[in-house]
């Protein structure tokens, strides 16, 4: 760890107690922390002590249930505004740049990235922006290391199997506009989206998605803190990953 990370961790321990970052420290041990599920091998960091299950009940975590309920309640208006933006403001969408690749047949409209709301999106999709701000950003449930975006897969597009970088955030999907023939597979289990409803899964497990339908498939993706992480852990992980990214950019 760099001196900056060590100093930040010391401040957090001083505020929350000497054992408040035990799991983060274990994650950083040589060898990468605890044993992994075979389908988490591609993830870089696994925080120990979190539930090792790929799929989660969207309403099964009290911390996240209000986010789920708010987005599902707003779905009709969100879909209407998204449809208008796709038809009339296509310039607000861009090729999605995953940490592994960039795909022209995977389009994204970002509402949150780089630790901040994307204010330009408020005009195109105001309801989704408002719900995100009120229920995820202002409540600090969103993981500031990641993002929220409308994810549009064009017909015949596929997202290849991959693991995301860690397990301490969790991915919420609001099914906005879902044609027939779309699916998502997480840790070998394939499901489909039900329009207007949410799916919640741990994307440190290998996952993939495809659109075999005849029109675009759109979900709203929100990267939230895993509900089994603690406040001091979230603070420490934010410092850690931010510093690692800075060093990588400087290097």
Image: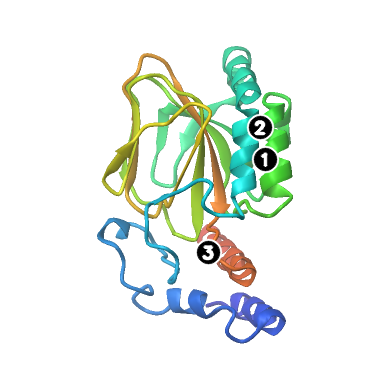
Residue receiving disc 1: 132
- Name the residue rendered at 66%, 76% in the picture: 8
Determine if residue 220 is in view. yes
> Left or right: where does residue 53 sit relative to residue 126?
left
Q: Nearer the viewer, residue 220 or 52?
A: 52
Disc 3 marks which residue? Answer: 228
- Percent across and percent down for residue 157 are 35, 26
Q: For the residue labelled by badge 3, is the local secondary structure a helix, a strand or a loop?
A: loop
Q: Which mark is residue 246?
A: none
Q: Nearer the viewer, residue 230 or 99?
A: 230
Q: Residues within 10 Å of mark 1 (few under 14, many from 20)?
A: many
Q: Which tag is nearer the camera, tag 2 or tag 3?
A: 3
Give the labeled residue for mark 2.
128
Q: How far apart are the two marked residues, 2 and 3, measured between alpha carbons?
A: 26 Å
Residue 243 picture location, percent across and down: 58, 66
Circle nearer the N terminus (2, 3): 2
The earlier-in-sequence mark between 3 and 1 is 1
Side of 8 where 248 appears, left or right: left
Query: Is 125 left, or right, of 50 in this rendering?
Result: right
Tell me where residue 213 appears, x and y as whole percent.
Answer: 35, 18
Q: Give the answer, above or below, for where 107 lies relative to 136.
A: above
User: How far apart are the two marked residues, 1 and 2, measured between alpha carbons?
Assistant: 6 Å
Asked where in the image residue 211 lies, by quadrant, the reply is top left
Residue 106, picture quadrant: top left
33 above or below 208? below
The answer to whether the residue labelled 3 contacts the one labelled 1, judged by CB atoms less than 8 Å apart, is no
Q: Pointer 1 and pointer 2: residues touching (CB < 8 Å)?
A: yes
Does the CB distance between marks 2 and 3 fall below 8 Å?
Answer: no
Residue located at (44% from left, 71% from top): 49
Q: Is residue 113 visible?
A: no
Q: 14 or 246: which is nearer to us?
A: 14
């Amino acid at each position: 760890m760099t001196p900056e990370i060590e100093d930040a961790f010391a401040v957090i321990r001083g505020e929350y107690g000497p054992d408040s970052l035990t799991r983060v420290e274990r994650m950083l041990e040589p060898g990468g922390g605890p044993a992994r599920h075979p389908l988490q091998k591609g993830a870089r960091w696994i925080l120990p002590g979190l539930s090792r299950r790929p799929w989660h009940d969207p309403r099964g975590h009290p911390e996240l249930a209000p986010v789920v309920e708010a987005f599902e309640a707003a779905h009709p208006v969100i879909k209407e505004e998204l449809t208008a933006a796709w038809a009339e403001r296509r310039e607000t969408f861009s090729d999605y740049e995953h940490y592994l690749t960039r795909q022209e047949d995977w389009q994204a409209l970002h509402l949150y990235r780089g630790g901040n709301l994307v204010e330009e999106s408020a005009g195109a999709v105001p309801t989704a922006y408002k719900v995100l701000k009120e229920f995820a950003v202002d409540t600090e449930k969103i993981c500031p290391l990641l993002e929220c975006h409308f994810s549009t897969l064009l017909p015949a597009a596929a997202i290849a199997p991959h693991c995301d970088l860690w397990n301490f955030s969790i991915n919420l999907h609001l099914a906005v506009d879902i044609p027939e023939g779309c699916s998502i597979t997480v840790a070998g289990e394939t499901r489909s989206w039900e329009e207007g409803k949410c799916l919640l899964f741990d994307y440190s497990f290998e996952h993939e998605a495809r659109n075999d339908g005849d029109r675009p498939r759109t979900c709203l993706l929100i990267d939230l803190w895993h509900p089994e992480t603690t406040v001091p852990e979230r603070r420490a992980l934010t410092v850690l990953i931010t510093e690692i990214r800075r060093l990588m950019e400087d290097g």
